[in-house]
Amino acid sequence: MSQELQTIIDLIRYGASRFNAAGLTFGHSYDNALDEATQLTLHALHLPHDLPPAYGNARITEAEKEDVLGLFLRRIEERIPACYLTGEAWFAGLSFKCDPRALVPRSPIAELIESGFQP
């Protein structure tokens, strides 16, 4: 199976599918499996979170694949929030350093902050 995962987008799609099948809950920076799989994949590959979609078809090395799949496995088996695995949480469009000592914001208040508290 691992042989079939050859590109960045393959890994992201696979991770999202596995997260959904595992019944994970989301909300620590990301509210869905696809966004969280993207974050973990890009983190493991040392790529920026806003990587243009054109790079999705970039092929990955076996070592890179192992790094990404290792993060996916920890997320599923240990139920560790992605922000603790990456050391980074996003809130209101800003990046914050994060570890298990932090209470990660999960509230929709970020939308209010981003809109300048306008309705």
Image (cartoon, rainbow, N blue to C red):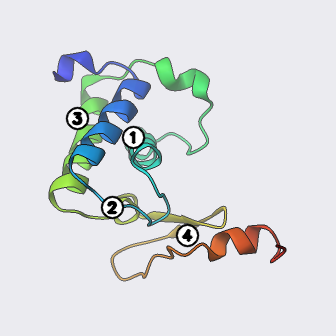
Q: Which quarter of the rendered picture does the N terminus lie within? A: top left
Q: Are marks 4 and 3 in contact (CB under 8 Å)?
A: no
What residue sits 75% from the left and 67% below the top?
114
CA gap between label 1 and label 2 equals 18 Å
In three-dimensional space, the C-alpha distance between marks 2 and 4, rounded to whole angstroms, equals 21 Å
- Which residue is label 2 attached to? 25
Percent of width and height locating residue 15? 31, 39
Q: Are marks 1 and 4 in contact (CB under 8 Å)?
A: no
In the image, which is nearer the foreground, mark 1 or mark 3? 1
**Distance from the alpha carbon under mark 1 to that under mark 3:** 11 Å
Q: Secondary structure at mark 1?
A: helix
Q: CA distance from mark 3 to mark 2?
A: 24 Å
Question: Residue 96 shows which numbered tag?
Answer: 4
The residue wearing badge 3 is: 66
- Quadrant into which the C terminus falls: bottom right
Where residue 9 appears, as percent x and y from the top left, is 43, 26
Q: Is residue 83 left or right of residue 56?
A: left
Question: Mark 1 highlights which residue?
Answer: 41
